[in-house]
Amino acid sequence: MRRPLLVRGPDQAFPQADLVTLLGALRALYVPLEIREDVPKKATKTSVLGFVGSSKIVQLAVALESGRHFDTLCAIPRFVARDIGGSDPERMAAPRVEDYVKKVFEGSRVTVNVVSDDATLCREFPLFSAVNRCAKGNYKELYCY
């Protein structure tokens, strides 16, 4: 199905139903990063998604999903979180997450600072350090490329 049309029946009981419906549909159209990179022909599931409803709701849903305005809304694009938390943990080991996040926020008003010093992590970010302790000294976990 390359051009689905989404129609939601009228219902005043749930004022945000249009937005929730659209976000659910956009979530279903997400294609994992690994697929987008390895099989470019399958990078998208549809060419167009039609929706019968308010254009303002459509604009809000698209902005939230794509992060088009993430530097002004302070919302990380939802697809970025899905890409980072994808199915292949080696694909998004720490150095690759760093590269990916820098690329996503490049040219925006968001500044990305990377803390990689173990002493600083232990002192200023003890919970991150606790999670990181299993990867310390493990070359494969630290530098999977």
Image (tube, grey):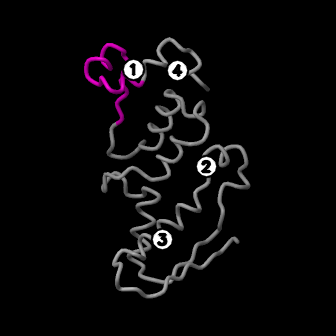
4 or 2: tag closer to the N-terminus: 2
Residue occupying image coordinates x 32% and y 13%: 119
- Against 51, residue 63 (above or below) is above
Local crowd size for mark 2, using a 10 Å CA cut-off: few (<14), some (14–19), many (≥20): some
What is the number of callouts on the image?
4
- Against 11, residue 68 (above or below) is above
Local crowd size for mark 4, using a 10 Å CA cut-off: few (<14), some (14–19), many (≥20): some
Location of mark 3 (residue) = 22
Location of mark 1 (residue) = 116
Q: Residue 142 — which label?
A: 4
Q: Residue 66 — which label?
A: none
Q: Judging from the image, what secondary structure is the residue with disc 2 in? A: loop
Local crowd size for mark 1, using a 10 Å CA cut-off: few (<14), some (14–19), many (≥20): few
Location of mark 2 (residue) = 32
Distance between mark 3 and mark 2 Cα atoms: 19 Å
Q: Judging from the image, what secondary structure is the residue with disc 3 in? A: helix
- Against 7, residue 40 (above or below) is above
- Image quadrant of residue 121? top left
Extreme residue in the left direction? 124
Q: Judging from the image, what secondary structure is the residue with disc 4 in? A: helix
Q: Which residues are magenta?
A: 112-131
Distance between mark 4 and mark 3 Cα atoms: 38 Å
4 or 3: tag closer to the N-terminus: 3
Distance between mark 3 and mark 1 Cα atoms: 39 Å
2 or 1: tag closer to the N-terminus: 2
